[in-house]
Amino acid sequence: MNNTDLKAFVDELIQCNELVTINTEVDAYLEIAEITDRVSKTPGKQNKALLFTNVKNYQMPVLINAFGSDKRICMALGVEKLDDIGVRIKQLLKPKVPENFLDKLALLPTLMEVGKFPPQIVNKSGSCQEVVLTNRDEPMLDTLPIITSWPYDAAPFITLGVVITRDPKSQIRNLGIYRMQYINNNTLAMHWHKHHDGARHFENQREHESSAVPYIVEPPNYGTFFDNHKYQDQNVKLEVAVVIGSDPAVTYAASAPLPPDIDEFLLAGFLRKKPVKLVKCKTVDLEVPSDAQIVIEGYVDQAQLINEGPFGDHTGFYSLPGLFPTFHVTAVTHQAKPIYQTTIVGKPPQEDCYLGKATERIFLPMVQLLVPEIVDMNLPWEGVFHNCAIISINKRYPGQAKKVMNAVWGLGQLMFTKFVIVVDKDINVHNLSQVALVVFGNTCPRRDTLITDGPLDILDHASPILGYGSKMGIDATVKWKAEGCNRDWPQPIVMSAAVKELVSAKWLQYGIE
């Protein structure tokens, strides 16, 4: 996709028969979610993006499941397959050393490509500001068809908003996707956790404005990393802009696990091979994509914590209620005829599974740069991307599998991985049956299991302490004598290549098919 507008992506989905337009009246309360859940779990070509044009009590159409298949996530990022992006990244990270002058010239385009990515600020209003709503007494959030996904959700939630903040210390921008619970026409609850960059920006803002209250390391017990008495009597605010319905590359980039000091707009520019064009917000000092469908402007006041949740989450369970910062809306801007893009999460597969798979493939070269013995990696849907990582390695010395486990637990958001399974390089990590066979057959639990303690994802309801607990590594590689296996290791059963070729050539003669 060369155009960076969401509507152009919708047009492309229509042309490729990847979108169903539903004109029947539907309710934003549960009905859209139930339709989408059924479609997202339908195998094959019946799994479509959905555009609801007749949402009860709202004027805006709702787009959902737009990224919810291998084909559509590739279309969204403009590639034939996700590994193509990983190849580009690998060339940037480890370019071939030029051997002569012509090789040096051939390397220049790759190196120059990096300089083309920074976003460009446009000194005029963008199409995202064709309509500007700033009167808090008039409908603001109430103009948006915010959906309720599950019966016990506390309220409607914005689930695919790109949250933009700026670090008050470094002035570096960050994009993240955090859910936001609808409270009223101009108030949301901002669900960001301690490890999220948006929350870190707020901490930096608090330290920037006041150092009167000491930082409290120990989190409270009510299910959140935010403690109300830390902020009492402080007027600490962080400006925020939330983009709904941007270029798919921007939406993906906001979900990507980039280092804190890298602007996600750079990744979006890299994916698109051209800069993202930005415009200044109307009421806050932030920039947003000029062609976004909808923008919510405002500020987060962490002195005003508010009950948020429960929420039916991607773990397949409801995340419990807790206290989170209040997001006060100062403006809502949008295109003249905007599309409200959203998603639901729950038991996989859902749309977020394909966003997670994109991260797995795109960031694999970066993981391999730091842990070079890794051959491939699978973050299975059933592990909801932080509960399990299956990794194949080129094993060269005793104990290497356990070395890799510890390395993985030290890499960015992979530190949350609860189970790390390591197999040999000839095992297809994406074939769960093949992986299970070697896990069950190649392991001695006492010898091949490594259990350690460390940070876990906040959404892990099984951990004994919020955000902290035990992790397990399983070494399912072939064992060497130096690893305590004094028996001969058996050879796997594999038919000879010559016989396989013979049978394939004669297959039709057998009359089986």
Image (tube, helix red, strand yellow):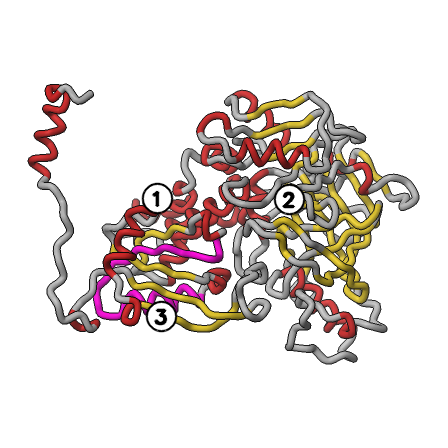
Residue 210 falls in image quadrant: bottom right
Q: Give the CA separation, mark 3 to mark 2.
A: 37 Å
x and y percentages locating residue 356 in the rendered image? 49, 47
> Residue at point 25% right, 58% down?
394
Location of mark 3 (residue): 450
x and y percentages locating residue 89 in the rendered image? 42, 49
Above or below — where is 459 with respect to 40?
below
Which comes before the other along the chain, label 3 or label 1? 1
Callout in the foreground (3, 1): 3
- Residue 126 in sight here: no
Above or below — where is 336 with respect to 235?
above
**Label 1 amino acid?**
Ala
Location of mark 1 (residue): 106
Q: Give the CA separation, mark 1 to mark 2.
A: 40 Å
Label annotation for residue 160: 2
Per the rendered image, the range of residues in magenta is 385-410
Left or right: 379 with respect to 277?
left
Q: Secondary structure at mark 1?
A: helix
**Label 3 amino acid?**
Leu
Q: Give the CA separation, mark 3 to mark 1.
A: 46 Å
